[in-house]
Amino acid sequence: MLVRSPQKLAQSNLSPPVKFISQNSSSLTLLNTVQLLLLIHFLSSNITQKDGKEPPGPTPLPVFGNFLQLDLKKIHVTLLELSKQFGSIFTIYLGTKKVVVLVGYNTVKEALVDYAEVFGERDSKPIIDELFRGQGIVWANGDTWKEMRRFSMTNLKDFGMGKKEFEDKIIEECHYLMEAFKQFKGEFDINQSLSNATANVICSFIYGNRFDYNDPEFTSLVNRTCRNNKLLSTPSVQLYNMFPWIGKWFSYPNEFKKAFAANREQQMKLVSHLKETLNPKMCRGFVDAFLIHQDNLEKSGITTSHFHNENLLITIMNLFVGGTETSSRTITWGLFLMAKYPKIQEKVREELSRVMGDHQVQFKDRTELPFTNAVIHEAQRLTAIAALGLPHRTSQDITFRGHFIKKDESEWEKPYTFYPEHFLDKDGKFIQRDAFMVFSAGRRVCPGASLARTEVFIFFTTLLQRFRITFPPGVSEDELLLSPSDSLILNPSNVKLCAVPL
Ligand code: HEM
């Protein structure tokens, strides 16, 4: 197979974030690369330039399209390389599917925000369609999406997202996590522990309770979720999505489906238990709120609503997946960078100790902790975990921008470097940057962003107050690359770290 080497990006060891978007009948992918200041969307064939011509792109082969030119293990890297040649709007073919890629913060922001309606649809893939069947939030469109998203967001707010009551749950979880960290002597897979903790935060919202880290039912749910994020971006699953007729011979698509089925079964059991013990006067979490709403609709004689059991199941699976590895990998990257840049780690700890002493950090304290806040933002900017993001599609034909746009790498002073000063002014005060778009923008903007911001801030600061993060002894500098492993949600290749109690 002809695979282009990722050249400069590979050398820079950075992980560009990518999101996928698509148009009408076919698909548009949005790739958001923070370090290059690029956001790329895959748009489908219905995008044209002002002169009616299609955007340029590499010549496709019959049937295969451009897939032989793409490094399927790091498709976002190949796309960035292609954008250097073809500019910010170009066309590629994934098999026979025509896709337009948009690159650049301004281009993507314009698409997602100024043309929010047109670019706000979700594109799907064969393997996703088979399993999710257009239900829930993430892979849904139209009224189902609208209703499920609205209901989830209302409940996230009602349960205190972005408020003190939910923050207390996050702080409580962080204390369980620290106890787990203390059990480890030497190196351990920090992302696994963090995923258990972030999964528990979202479980507190969904079910109204957390789970023990030693509960095998819980850990298998978390592990399968993480595994499926990885499987979704494997070359064989991508091939399956391009050519479903040949792809079924590969083992990964089958493993993905089996893990999905097992998770679905487990979530069903949890929902059944909540149904049996439901008390409408005491709403424990999202599932209870949904069941109560469902019941009220039935009592009012409404039988055709979107509040049916399938939507409940897929929505909670979406929230569980959406809320688990995104946050845990963000924190993992933050800690990984602290191990790689110990002087910056010490500077964070010095600020924490000067401002907070031994007190528990709260989200409101971030205004007093500008350096720490800048480090967290910079870690998110540089590593951009959602590099493969989620595919969008446009709802109608569109002439977009009307011209070939040269990519713009100038948003960040040092796009390839871990440089917390990107978020600090000359007086050391924290500054918000428009180009920081890790939660996306527009109609599909991450509904868990407020929860995630609190979670990442509390976990990161509390852990650094109590532990020194280092690489395992004997690991050479060469192994400490920032190149991500291949996964839908990018992770450092080497996630084994040591947490030394202070
Ligand atoms: C640091 C953590 C997180 C990051 C970086 C992140 C990032 C993102 C991104 C980039 C998208 C795609 C938006 C688009 O399609 O344009 C997204 C969607 C989504 N996220 Fe998050 N997310 C995080 C945490 C969470 C949490 C905690 C939840 C759960 C409450 C959540 C639930 C979702 C859902 C349900 C969607 C689909 C929205 C839709 O299709 O309308 N995310 N997230």
Image: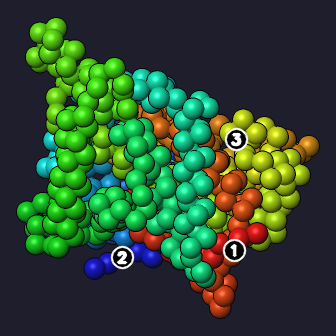
Question: Tag 1's secondary structure?
Answer: strand
Percent coordinates x, y for residue 58 in the rendering: 35, 60
Q: Which amino acid, by three-letter code, is at mark 3?
A: Gln
Percent coordinates x, y for residue 100 in the rendering: 35, 46
Q: Quadrant of the C terminus?
A: bottom right
Percent coordinates x, y for residue 186 in the rendering: 61, 82
Disc number for residue 500: 1
Q: Which amino acid, by three-letter code, is at mark 2?
A: Val
| Above or below for 348 versus 368 | below
Sequence-first disc among 3 and 2: 2
- In the figure, is residue 244 to the left or right of 313? left
Percent coordinates x, y for residue 346 in the rendering: 82, 65
Residue 276 visible: yes
What is the C-alpha distance between the residues marked 1 and 3? 23 Å
Sequence-first disc among 1 and 3: 3
| Above or below for 24 versus 88 | above
Q: Residue at x 65, y 37 (%)?
A: 434
What is the C-alpha distance between the residues marked 3 and 2? 47 Å
Disc number for residue 3: 2
Disc number for residue 362: 3
Foreground: disc 1 or disc 2: 1
- Bin the neighbour count of mark 1 within 10 Å (Cα to Cα): few under 14, some 14-19, many 20 and up: some
